[in-house]
Each structure stands twice: as C-alpha cells, then as structure tokens.
Image (cartoon, helix red, strand yellow):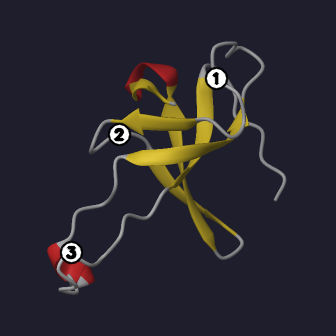
Amino acid sequence: MNFQPLGERVLVKRVEEANTTASGIIIPDSATEKPSTGEVVAVSKEVSELACGNIVIFGKYSGNEITLGVDKFLVLDTDDIFGIIG
C-alpha cells in the first residue's frame, strides 16, 4: 500500500471488536455497529500530534471509507479524532 494523506488528515484502519459476549453468545455482524476505534496507518506531513500505530477514537459517522487492495480504511480529518488510547 502506498497512500499519503494530504492536509490535516490521517489514514485509519478500524479495529474490529469481539463478536462474542462474555458468556459466549455470538453476535451476528448485522446486529453490530461499526467500531469507532482504529489504528493510524498513515499520517500527513501537517499532522504532528499523531503517529503511525496510535489507536484513536473517532466519530461514528466520520471520515470517508476507501479500499486499498483488499483492505478497507478511513481517511479522517484530525478534527474528527477525539483522542488517543493508551
């Protein structure tokens, strides 16, 4: 993959959440929401507070989904990112 975000944007890959409950019940994909956490994969030159590998929380309907190869990613403005986990 060779993608460089422009402006104050980052490329994020969603972190998939577990699809089973603590008691072992499997939750189907149709009943789950898209996760609002992801790993930063690429950062534009204008963004200094984020780095590749950061786990971030972002808005539920934020960003634009793109497909690179077989993987799906989100291109997010830094204003759509609420914070860094960890």
Q: Measure the C-alpha gap from mark 1 to mark 2.
A: 17 Å
51 lies left or right of 10:
right
Who comes first in sequence, dot 3 or dot 1?
3
Mark 2 residue crowding within 10 angstroms, few (<14) / some (14–19) / many (20+): some
Quadrant position of residue 7: top right
**Residue 68 on image: x %, y %:** 68, 64
Q: Kindly identify which residue carries mark 3.
A: 21
Picture layout, residue 32 above or below residue 9: below
Picture layout, residue 74 above or below residue 26: above
Q: Kindly identify which residue carries mark 2.
A: 62
1 vs 2, front mark: 1
Mark 1 residue crowding within 10 angstroms, few (<14) / some (14–19) / many (20+): some
Q: Kindly identify which residue carries mark 1.
A: 50
Label 1 element class: loop
Three-letter amino acid code of the residue under disc 1: Leu
Q: Quadrant of the N terminus?
A: bottom right
3 vs 1, front mark: 3
**Residue 31 on image: x %, y %:** 15, 76
80 lies left or right of 46:
left
Label 3 element class: loop
Three-letter amino acid code of the residue under disc 3: Thr
Name the residue: 63% across, 14% down.
Answer: 49
Q: Measure the C-alpha gap from mark 3 to mark 2.
A: 27 Å
Q: Nearer the viewer, residue 77 or 52?
A: 52
